[in-house]
Amino acid sequence: MIHVDTEVLQQQLLDARARTLSLTLDLTGSQLLGPRLKIVNPPLWEIGHLAWFQERWCLRHREGEPELLPSVRHDADGLYDSSSVPHDRRWHLPLPGLERTLEYLHEVLQRVLDKLAAKPAGAWSYFAQLAALHEEMHCEAFTYTRQTLGYSAPCGSGASSLRDKHSVPQGDADIAGGIFMLGARPDDGFVFDNEKWAHQVTVAPFSIARACVTNAEFVSFVEDAGYSRPELWSGDGWAWCASANASHPAYWRKAGNAWCARVYDRWLPIVADAAVIHVNWYEADAYCRWARRRLPSEAEWEFAAASEPADLSRKRRYPWGNQEPDAQRANLYGSSDHAVDVAGYAQGESAWGCRQMIGNVWEWTADAFEPYPGFVVDAYKEYSQPWFGDHKVLRGGCFATRADLIRNTWRNFYTPDRRDVFAGFRTCA
């Protein structure tokens, strides 16, 4: 168990809570529930779920005891337990109003902070980390919801993008390949069960794009009838394309001869050299077929992000090294409020010359989400295990990801039809 300083943990919890409130307190009336969609939760339910999750693991869970301690709300489990409350029911529950939901949220956090102050050491601090990171993941999901439903941009957003003086990275990085340890190590600090543990893989030599696919590049695919040519799509992908009646990325439309994209509640011209975003795995795969390219495997992606050409036994936590992310290296939460020009953040390049492998947009990989060898489920059993097999892996984080969450070994996962995620992709030769 990696020790985490109590003050650091307290600040993580407070930072996550401040972000939750900034993303939700401006929602009123019908916005607190929103329409029933497969890809979103009712915001009012989701706020309560954050309180329930934090309470469940930090205050009610007892190591080795099957029964939880009572909740401060008698109805909490019936309302907010995501493993037992079906998604479609969340719009029809007798949810308390926003004021009472916030009271629950505040009371739980205060009790956790008090417990940290009184009992800072011990295994239970793992669950305080889990709660903070879980809340950050939901904060990112809140941004997806606001985009999906066309709500205004989150309060406090609007940071200017970093316009780097460097030119757009061109071409591929040629990767030598070799024996590589894929996954997290026991001394890496807090990691999730699906990252455990580092295991030896052999990666053949390959070439990977130094930058993600841009809007301009994806426009060429769209305007070459990419969405109406079944030979470019997998069987499942073509079935999705037809059923969705898709003809371009989500939130795009054409105004005269120019393409625009909806960014929250505003329509803006697309930026040619910005990374394409809101494309699903099927769309990324079809683009690759059109371009005579392919998506990288997970192992290839992590190899390009984390290894060093001079010594493959050394592995970096981030593409640029082991220094924590900052606004010069990565477009993560707090740096910009949108996907930016792929020329930006040159200081964050990997040892192989690949740019923006952390931040800006999540990157689809070719692989299905599967457990690593010897997988052992963590205490939070619902995090990874239920989703193995039918989800695809994404790597690298995006502009809405807080730095505390992300590292080279982090594995995100979504079904291949999801377009609401802040996801793009890079390609391999």
Image: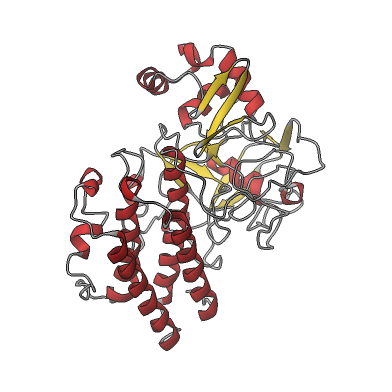
Q: Is residue 382 left or right of residue 181?
A: left
Image quarter of the C terminus: top right
Which residue sits at x=51%, y=80%? 6
Say if residue 292 shows up in the picture.
Answer: no
Q: Position of residue 412 (x, y in %)?
A: 47, 47
Which residue sits at x=63%, y=18%? 220
The coloring applied to the image is secondary structure
Which residue sits at x=20%, y=46%? 89
Residue 133 drawn above or below residue 27:
below
Say if residue 65 shows up in the picture.
Answer: yes
Q: Is residue 392 left or right of residue 267?
A: left
Viewer-nearest residue: 322 or 128: 128
Q: Position of residue 173 (x, y in %)?
A: 73, 36
Residue 374 drawn above or below residue 101:
above
Viewer-nearest residue: 261 or 320: 261
Q: Position of residue 353 (x, y in %)?
A: 75, 43
Residue 96 drawn above or below residue 91:
below
**Corner quadrant of residue 134:** bottom left
**Corner quadrant of residue 163:** top right
Residue 209 drawn above or below residue 306:
above
Q: Check the image and name the residue furthest to the front.
A: 29
Q: Position of residue 302 (x, y in %)?
A: 59, 47
**Corner quadrant of residue 240:** top left
Q: Is residue 59 left or right of residue 25?
A: left
